[in-house]
Amino acid sequence: MRYLPLTPSDRQAMLGVIGANSIDDLFVDVPVQAQLDGPIRGLPNHASEMAVERHFSNLARRNMTASHNPFFLGAGAYKHHVPASVDHIIQRGEFLTAYTPYQPEIAQGTLQMLFEFQTQVARLFGCDVANASMYDGSTACWEAIGMAGRITKRSKAVLSSGLHPHYVSVAKTMAQYTGDTLDTALPELSAATDSARLINAIDGETSCVVVQYPDILGRIEDLSGIAAKAHEHGALLIAVVTEPVALGAIKAPGEMGADIVVGEGQSLGVGLQFGGPYVGLFACKEKFVRQMPGRLCGETVDAEGKRGFVLTLSTREQHIRREKATSNICTNSGLCALAFSVHLTLLGEKGLRGLARLNHTLAVQAAERLTKIPDVELVNSSFFNEFTLKLPKEARPVVRALADHKVLGGVSLGRLYPGADALSNGLVVAVTEVATSEDVETFAAALQEILA
Amino acid sequence: MRYLPLTPSDRQAMLGVIGANSIDDLFVDVPVQAQLDGPIRGLPNHASEMAVERHFSNLARRNMTASHNPFFLGAGAYKHHVPASVDHIIQRGEFLTAYTPYQPEIAQGTLQMLFEFQTQVARLFGCDVANASMYDGSTACWEAIGMAGRITKRSKAVLSSGLHPHYVSVAKTMAQYTGDTLDTALPELSAATDSARLINAIDGETSCVVVQYPDILGRIEDLSGIAAKAHEHGALLIAVVTEPVALGAIKAPGEMGADIVVGEGQSLGVGLQFGGPYVGLFACKEKFVRQMPGRLCGETVDAEGKRGFVLTLSTREQHIRREKATSNICTNSGLCALAFSVHLTLLGEKGLRGLARLNHTLAVQAAERLTKIPDVELVNSSFFNEFTLKLPKEARPVVRALADHKVLGGVSLGRLYPGADALSNGLVVAVTEVATSEDVETFAAALQEILA
Amino acid sequence: MNTINQSGWKPEMHTASNTGPATYTGNKALMLEEALIFEIGTSGTTGVDLADAPKVASRLGNLERHRDIGLPGLSEPETVRHYTRLSRQNYAIDLGFFPLGSCTMKHNPRLNEKVARMAGFADIHPLQPVETVQGALAVIHELAHWLITLTGMKAVAMSPKAGAHGELCGILAIRAALTARGDARSVILCPESAHGTNPATAAFAGYAVENIPATSEGRVDLAALKARLGPDVAGVMITNPNTCGLFERDLREISDAVHAAGGYVYCDGANFNAIVGRVRPGDLGVDAMHINLHKTFSTPHGGGGPGSGPVVLSEALAPYAPLPFVDKDGDHYLLVEEETAGEHHESTFGRMVAFHGQMGMFTRALSYIMSHGADGLRQVAEDAVLNANYILRSLEDVLEAPFADSGPCMHEALFSDNGMAEGFSTLDIAKGLIDEGYHPMTVYFPLVVHGAMLVEPTETESKATLDQFIGALRSVVERAKVGDPSLKSAPHHAPRRRLDETQAARKPVLVWHEPEQAVAAE
Amino acid sequence: MNTINQSGWKPEMHTASNTGPATYTGNKALMLEEALIFEIGTSGTTGVDLADAPKVASRLGNLERHRDIGLPGLSEPETVRHYTRLSRQNYAIDLGFFPLGSCTMKHNPRLNEKVARMAGFADIHPLQPVETVQGALAVIHELAHWLITLTGMKAVAMSPKAGAHGELCGILAIRAALTARGDARSVILCPESAHGTNPATAAFAGYAVENIPATSEGRVDLAALKARLGPDVAGVMITNPNTCGLFERDLREISDAVHAAGGYVYCDGANFNAIVGRVRPGDLGVDAMHINLHKTFSTPHGGGGPGSGPVVLSEALAPYAPLPFVDKDGDHYLLVEEETAGEHHESTFGRMVAFHGQMGMFTRALSYIMSHGADGLRQVAEDAVLNANYILRSLEDVLEAPFADSGPCMHEALFSDNGMAEGFSTLDIAKGLIDEGYHPMTVYFPLVVHGAMLVEPTETESKATLDQFIGALRSVVERAKVGDPSLKSAPHHAPRRRLDETQAARKPVLVWHEPEQAVAAE
Ligand SMILES: Cc1ncc(COP(=O)(O)O)c(C=O)c1O
Ligand SMILES: Cc1ncc(COP(=O)(O)O)c(C=O)c1O
């Protein structure tokens, strides 16, 4: 077997040193009834690299890819062009095959990268500090709700109806067990968000308000009013960003008063990958740092006085604090954080702002083109690179029909909110720099044909 | 421009240090008439990474690939499965973006690899020593003829009719200028080679005999008789190996008396790449080492007595010896040599022999299957993984028709020997481990249909 | 023993090495210092070219950004160099032996990286119509089949994102099962030697955590455990093989007792590598177990993730598995999400993540599993255990091995630092190993052993590597025993000397700040 | 100047660095010793799994191999580690500044690596029917169009495999043109400062090589050259910009004179990077020039190749271009090989390689060229020249720059080692730079300058990198001027100290041999 270096004679010699007659001697502590007498039946034996690769390329060919078809899906995961150098860097064995940096003297590469990542995330979100990553946006979101509970010692969270429905589901699942109560609502197919509802719901019991920015329908609104009301009642504002590229064009949530800003980092560096691995972003005000979940990398000096980096404040974490930890998270999303950070370093201020401008422009043009189709209406008054169309019929079958036309034409609200009839004609369309004008034309033509 | 780090203000500051007003001041030595006044007209300006990548993927899609179709081409370039780790290793920046190892203290990685490569090649070919690579098999072949001329101080080379016709062309091209005479012939569509012709042609004027093993039709023959006759007349035997995998199953040319063994290393590690870059292999007897072309890596020690490696015997080379050098070669094929060496290290003795066995077996089975087609005959009595079929009609159009059936079905002798009518029904078929039995079936069915 | 190192020359222990002068740049030949992107980049530089954006009327709802973000950009050459230099300050499996106990740092095959990057997997959106992602769903389904079969369980929840997330999934399933039968229990039992994620998870899910006592041989104290069981105990969390590297002989009996008392058995499967193909946890009465695909099934650890923690479930817990999951109907793969769950799976405890879990890890793990096959995986366990026992028995004369008499170890060998010179401890040994070219073993875990050193070699190491490591560790331990002061200040050859962790925690600097302007020109 | 290095701490020049003890393994933390595959592998180990070969009757003509080849195998984990460790003993552009004059070590974009690996290019056979490789032929044709247009020439031969091979192509074309007109000339003129491949090539093609004198300012002596021209001179080989880093101002006049005398002008285009987009060699009367795609157009140098050396040709030489080449007929690409050449191209001088040249380099180079475009390429030349002049002018106060008064330099700055302390020379400066974290410049070339140091920064280096390098070189030169003995024994921090090249050449050991059996147990 190509991955196993021991030769039969090595094994024999080693058993000799151990003083065992056979490998079975080393498994004596396994009760006899539980010992398997040979390879598990019904499963194939080892396969050559070529055979395995073929199996996968046959399966891969059964999927319709974002790069070979006009593509307009978003709703929490975005396709952007990732420079080839990003993938090159994350494949360096020294990054790819390292563990969590427990021995800082020989992990400065990972540690410095995390320090840079934390700084980038904090600046992008307009916060003081950020951690070294969470699993993804949805788990970052519920960790933020939990953290707000710890800080405020309250248990009522008010969730915007514009929060991604899967994030809401995750929060609801957790709330079943943590005793939090969640105030939630379904969105409406309108340009207005439910910020009035949120502001009304905030009271002295409220631990936090959770608002997505831009929201699930692509709408953008100023969070300052919500922040003010929350702060007035001692509650926290948690902002959720599922498309960080937007922050190259619009204000950072931190600027508008958010206390904790979490997000999904997938859209920079990471790629679509059918939903994972992604990278949860987590930032907050400095004063809350000791309540943060997850790893933190900090600056220090070595015995010669040279600057260096270490994991720090680990008294918050499970391996030190055990049942009193701020989270149970251990392995997080280090390599995706690296990909995010490399992509953002390549972009820089100038590139991110240019990319955001380009996305917005293309989205505006696409919205104009698609609403030329009879009976197709634009729901949004504001948006970044994603907007919601109201179709004259149920959107979910339309999306399937578009796929038959080889167009991946957005996410139907029927998929996101099954059973919510009022939403079922809604289609969320994302337009990034990868969409050419021919792609938009193909999409529009197919949509028009399907709707006719 | 993403690859250019200087900012406009850097440029200004640097011009200041230099004492120039503008960049044009640095080009004052260019005669005014030859100065271009701006970007060359008629050429596009810079393009984003995404745009460039799209351009190439559109072009790539216009090619029919070896991995997605039944594939049976050989004739000097072979498709083998290359383990993914080979490509990973050659993409390490430290190998990929290093120069020739002129500063050995910081190039031990490349140097040790070359030393290992030289040893592997020498052993595979049954020779004492090998160099650090040539451009490809064809240039290695003519460099060997030139070397034989220098050693024997004679100028008549006898070339087997089984030598790859492109290698013959290259040698003929060079012979026009070096004053060598070449005794060549066309092959015949028969199981017998022209070794009798070769043995007859050797005389006291002969510098060398050049024999390909296995030859262009896939035939294998014992070289000892030719070696004996050559040595008797003070001539050298040069063996040419275009499919090194064969040497996992058959005797090494060195074992049979070859003085110089050259070859094409493409089939291990390198891949098809439409013909290049490939890697020329070059090995010989120890006594000829000072007449060898190309770089040589040798063992030595450092100032602390530690083993290390350096480029050596450079007094043979152009940068020292200039017009008296053994060759003009400078840049060679280092990274392909690395790929070759890594692949061979992964295989090892056991793997190479197993791979050779598998290739031979599959070829024997394919030959049996294909000769079941009416009027299709096997030319060879011996072969390794490649054999020649005699079709009932001209093979070249058959190959094109096979491509229309999505089968890449071998190389016609009409393509290799245009105008040689006696050969035009010949089809050279290579069968490696990548050919499945379904592939062979598809090929056989299509061939039968086309011939019907 | 007179081991010479592999490169053919014999190092002379008493010659001081390389004492070259300090350099102008601070670099040392190939070991290069590298500043932060904030120190070398500028906001006007970019390593990305973009098509021009045509002018359109903005629809940004008057929220245009005016303030600078403060993101430095680097050109592509600077970027590649920055990260290449950083990478070279890391140790990694690709470089050498990385025997971090409990972490299963095995070789990461590059085939798996290639497979995961096929456009058909890497470039599909999680919300595409299921008809357009049949191949991806097939991968998830095939991997699920392997995991279920290898563990002898009933079902598997694929969406958890790492081991700890898997633990949470399992505990939530237990809680859902109890809730379903109207049985509100409040306690989870857990051994002191457990990984920190176990108690943290139980607490996160709303349980009180209580300790399970251990026997002197390093295993769960069956009698004490039985005595503690009762109507308040929701379940136990047991690690098997446990974090002392031992197989929990009594697990079947523990399971039976827990079940009899109305509780459930969670097994931490982080150490599954030691038994894969030789033992099926289902045969031991386990109700839920996470599998760290980034350990047993070799998806790369990436300097701290991403991982993937599918949870296999018993018949009793399967109905509570989270959404979404993949099902198969004839030749067609389905994705069971909220809308369809009603019919198929009404008792689900909910959703753990936005999408379908770590697809990029599923492809890698399945590629690894298919490459090994049933026979190869069994060999994996055997070689992993053989390597660990070889280390244990080769070093027990110089290092105290507290459970050396408890039977063979499984995948890892545990030592303590008893017997070192005054003032010398595990930390010094670890730092000494760094100079020798190794990543140290796991240190100070499990907590039950003084100065624990937990050495997990894995099956992808050769005997020659183990022999050299044994020699090196022996030499470092000897220095610790005689109190060699140079060991106290190790590492000497790494990019940094020992780092001041206290200072880091006292006044945390977690992000970069522009340095204060220098007071005047120097 | 008080440059502090970029990492924010100021190195103290007078503290000795890191003097840690030698290690048991010989490793130094991340700098790992690695033995040869022959020392660590075995003939029974393999890192490749193969399908079983069914038994068939052998058809090997009784030539079955019986003797062992002697090839060691390594498992995949050992293989990856072996080469990873080796790689870490190399310097490379990805690590830092690599100002090797005449070699144009610029950034190698990873986009190009990705493009070259697309199956449509990487996985096609050179002898496939042309209908099945239209996209590949399009790449060759597009690249050819760029090269012809950028140089202002008539045609391009794409098949040469590197610069020296391109030189041969050009000289053979000259010889073919002369032969075609029945004019047997015997001499090629070539400056002493030329790269060794120039005279070697001319000799290989059967010419006698004679020297062209240079002026004191480092350029071709026009008058002397003119005086030498005559009916025996087949042509001249001129490098422009030349290897002293200067533009050959008189090239147009030289060309006219050579043409008038019936000869041809070969231009060594290795240094085209300095003028691409600003000057077209065709406008200077050049008849043939090779372009090192692995220099100007950034295909990676790979530790010694592969390269690619297309040769652009003037109207006069185009008819003699070698086979095969790509042509276009409407939308259809043709491959002109031996069989079809008759009609189209009867005067070809023949064939230089088995197939069509370095396809894998063509894709990379075209990707690079398209990325830059006409505007970007012009900027490349300007920035490359700017960087070189910045180095020249920043160091001419400490290093003798023999041609500093000959006008601005082009892509590279040339210094001599005059003025160092007794016994100190270019070699010591080079080795000192290694410790500082740089790859040294080209040394002792061109031959016309004493202890030449040829510094080519290229355009992909930032000003900060140049500033640090200037500071470091200044510091090393100062040590060479005062005769610092620690410089004489540099490098101190590299994987090896200075290597004994004399011993290597005296009794060459070019392959590994099993060591003699040790006489007895120690
Ligand atoms: C025994 C044990 N349990 C649980 C975990 C947690 O797994 P993860 O890091 O994947 O969340 C670990 C990992 O370090 C472990 O070693
Ligand atoms: C000036 C000059 N000419 C020719 C060459 C030879 O080019 P290659 O190495 O590609 O054969 C070189 C390369 O080093 C060079 O610098």
Image (tube, coloured by chain):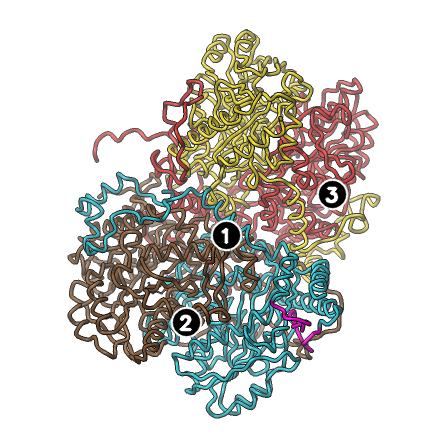
Chain colours: A yellow, B cyan, C red, D brown
Is the residue under label 1 in contact with that under label 2 (CB below 8 Å)? no
Q: Position of residue A205 (x, y in %)?
A: 57, 8
Please state the chain letter of the residue tagged with numbered disc 1 in the rendered image: C
For the record, the magenta segment spans: B377-396
Q: CA distance from mark 2 to mark 1?
A: 62 Å
Task: Check the picture and name the quadrant holding the C terminus of chain A.
Answer: top right
Disc 2 under 8 Å from ligand 2? The reply is no
Mark 2, residue position: D348
Instruction: Kindly identify the residue that appears in the image at 34 percent across and 68 percent down.
Output: D317
Mark 3, residue position: C146
Q: Position of residue B376 (x, y in %)?
A: 71, 71
Q: Position of residue C391 (x, y in %)?
A: 64, 52
Task: Check the picture and name the quadrant holding the N terminus of chain A.
Answer: bottom right
Mark 1, residue position: C436
Note whether A14 is above or below C485 in the view shown: below
Disc nearer the start of the sequence (1/3): 3
Is the residue under label 3 in contact with that under label 2 (CB below 8 Å)? no
- Disc 2 marks which amino acid? Thr
Q: Nearer the viewer, residue C238 or D38?
A: D38
Assess disc 3: are there few (<14), some (14-19) or many (≥20) residues with their C-alpha within 10 Å of its C-alpha. some
Q: Is residue B96 magenta?
A: no
Please state the chain letter of the residue tagged with numbered disc 2 in the rendered image: D
- Disc 1 marks which amino acid? Glu
Res C446 visible: no
Instruction: Kindly identify the residue that appears in the image at 22 percent across and 59 percent down.
Output: D246
Please state the chain letter of the residue tagged with numbered disc 3 in the rendered image: C
Q: CA distance from mark 2 to mark 3?
A: 62 Å
Disc 1 is placed on an element classified as loop
Disc 2 is placed on an element classified as loop
